[in-house]
Image (cartoon, rainbow, N blue to C red):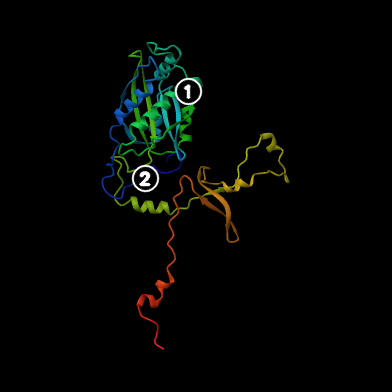
Amino acid sequence: MSPDGFNPGLRLKIRAPKGGDAGQRLRADGVEPALARALGKAGAPYEGLSLAAKPEAPRWDLPLADVIAALPEGGLVCLLEAGQDRRAICALDHGAVDALIEVQTTGRVDKGPGLPRAPTRIDAALTRDFVGLFLGALAGELADAAGVDWPLGLTYGTHLPDPRGLELLLPDHPCHLFQAALDLGEGAKTGSVLLAVPVTGADNPAPKGNTPAPGWGQPWQEIVLAAPAMLEAVLLRQTLPLSRVERLQAGDVLPFDRSDLASVAICDVRGRRLFSARLGRAGTRRAVNLTAGAGLRPAAPTKPPPDPVQQSPAATSGSGPPPA
């Protein structure tokens, strides 16, 4: 059973394709050379870094547990924002972090590995620009590549002092894992970089060797889509000092702006914002009207009412007025 309480076997059945080979899917071409070029561009502004990258073969559709297991021990791990409440992971090992700090403080990469130590906020601040350059360069390299089923517009989010909390911060969703070995300072140091991105394809077939029985996919999709989904309309959120909250009592008034009623949040059971809405009425009931925003499909076009002249019996039969 996965941490979110969902059976992995059922997940495979739901993802079963409607036809064809479940293990076959278009993969993005040229990921490895794109990684090498992107890392080279990211390291170019750092005089003395002399970064040369040797990417490994991509690992597709890994569960979150395998991604966490692949993180470099004692490395610097940061969360990346991928849009629509999705997140990715970027990690630099000890050698890469030391090299980036050394070129920014002394102008060169010292030979030999440094003393093992836990990454600090200063390490995160001094490596943030490199990570941002790498992500931007990789997005440019793969902008026109076919088969890219992960978000390219990744941005730096936050540094994680303790990566053991990743299982709580990220959903158990398949990820693609990209890794590269780094030569730094013309052989003075070696390092590595890891990038794990969430799969965002609409249909995610099961990996080879785990193909569910034919015919499972569509029935299970219908069962899941018919299941109830609990949503909560949040009219207002306020942040108050703890001392003020402790003094609250019956009869106290918490003022708010009327405009807040036009920005209602529709959230799931975990509190994640799914849609935006505004407060309104439906007959005699209070209601919320969904407004344009992320995750909301455009309104279906309405058909114009039929022309009464064209629908009249006389117009359709082509006959004239009845005789007197």
Tell which circle, 1 or 2, labels the residue nearer the N-terminal end.
Answer: 1
Frontmost residue, 319 versus 52 = 319
Q: How many marks?
A: 2
Tell me the quarter of the image containing the C terminus.
Answer: bottom left
Graded by Cα atoms within 10 Å as few (under 14), some (14 to 19) or many (20 or more), the crowding at tag 2 reads: few
Mark 1 and mark 2 in contact? Answer it, CB < 8 Å.
Answer: no
- Kind of residue at disc 1: Ala
Is residue 296 or residue 249 the one in the foreground? 296
Residue with the mark numbered 1: 124
Q: Position of residue 100 (x, y in %)?
A: 42, 18
Can residue 69 be seen here? Answer: no
Amino acid found under the numbered disc labelled 2: Ala
Q: Circle 2 is placed at which residue position?
A: 202
- Under circle 2, the secondary element is loop
**Residue 107 located left or right of residue 289:** left
Relative horizontal placement of residue 259, taking residue 312 as reference (left or right): right
Residue under the point 49% across and 48% down: 292
Q: 256 or 149, which is in the foreground?
A: 256
In which quadrant of the rendered view does residue 318 lie?
A: bottom left
SS at badge 1: helix
- Residue positioned 39% across, 15% down in the render: 47
Pointer 1 local density, CA inside 10 Å: few below 14, some 14–19, many at least 20: many
Residue shown at 52% from the left, 45% from the top: 269
> In the displayed structure, would residue 129 be above or below residue 174?
above
